[in-house]
Structures are given as structure tokens and as C-alpha cells.
Amino acid sequence: MTSPKRSPRSAKHPPVSPNEHRPTRYLIAFYSRTGFTRRVAYRLAQRLGSSDIEEIQDHRHRAGVFGFLRTAIEAVMTRSPEIAPSQFDPARYDVVVIGSPVWAAHVATPVRSYLKRHAASLTRVGMFCTMGSSGGDETLAEMTAMLHPDDETIENGRYPTLALRDADIKAKRFHRLETFIDALQGLHPQAHRSKAG
């Protein structure tokens, strides 16, 4: 298992005050097995500014062929493994961005556990996923549905979303990221349009 990455800002934020004039506070929570989702998360943090990063940690061995098979089986069976306690409270942020790799056209199971844990605190949300070639739309729809378990139907476009292929991330083709960032910045009335980094 990879060790947790340090957040660009180490101090936890005080509770959000709607009347306070300040930059929008973002929390980027993600899980990454191979590093692609991590790369996108850190690039988002750099571009958005005023961001904390929560790398979701579980206790399963997922390296190698057997680790890959385990992830696929768990994803298809929609399991929710135990994850480490969260470092940051999503309720203290203006916007929360959730990132997941695509596992067999499903959300990664540690992200599933995170969404279950914090669903009540996730109101202004953006979602992204990384994938080998396909399954992004299904994964993003599954993540959205988890925040609205009582809804019979989930309309498209409820939240800003982005699906990126691993090959594009490896080649640093991030042009679609800018549209996603614009949508995230528009989620909060005090969102600032300055470009960080």
C-alpha cells in the first residue's frame, strides 16, 4: 500500500461562514491504486488553489495480478471495505471533489466507502474518474446515485463530472480539465476565477 500523501495545506479549516469574504475552500478526496487518479487530484489542487487533499486509504493488498483481480471482484460485488479515518471533514468545505479510478465499470470500493461515510455532508460536489479505456460514464453515474439513494432516477448533469483516460493523463493531455475546473468554480457564490499555479 502506498503511504498517504501530505496535503498542500496541513492545517484543518474552521467551519465555513457563508458571509465571510474569502477564497472558496475545496477538498479533493480520492483513491488511487496505480497513481493516475492521484496525478489528476494534485493537478486540480494546484489549479483551484485553497485546496486540501484527502487520499482515501484502505487496508487491502492491491498490488500485482492478485491485487488487480481482488479489486475487480470487489467492485462488481459492490463491496465497501473498511477505510482509514478521514483527515478532513467535508462539511467544513465549500466544494468537495471526489476522484476514483474505474474498476470493472464501477467506482473503486474505497471511494464507495468514503461516499457512504460522508454522503450527508456532500452538497456542492464535483466528481472525476480515471480509466483505461471505458466505464467512465457508468462509474460517474454510480457515484451520483450513491449520494441520492432514495431517488428513482438521477438526471444527467446534476454535478460537474470528468472522465479521463490513463493514456491522456500519462501524455499530460489535460485540456478537458479546464472545463471541469470552470464548473467547480461556479458551484459556490464566492468562487474566485483566479488561476492558481
Image (cartoon, grey):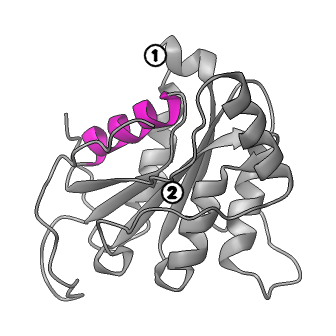
Q: Secondary structure at mark 1?
A: loop
Amino acid under label 2?
Ile
Does the magenta stretch mainly form a helix, a strand or a loop?
Answer: helix
Q: Is residue 157 visible?
A: no
Circle on res. 172: 1
For image coordinates 80% across by 73% down, the residue present is 154
Residue at far right of view: 152
Q: How many marks?
A: 2
Amino acid under label 1?
Lys
Circle on res. 98: 2
For image coordinates 43% across by 49% down, the residue present is 182
Residue 80 percent coordinates (x, y): 67, 65
First-in-chain label (1 vs 2) = 2
On screen, residue 117 above or below 101 = below
Residues 53 and 58: in front is: 58
- Look at the image and give the residue range highlighted in magenta: 35-48
Residues 53 and 176: in front is: 53
Circle on res. 71: none
On screen, residue 103 above or below 63 = below
For image coordinates 44% across by 68% down, the residue present is 187
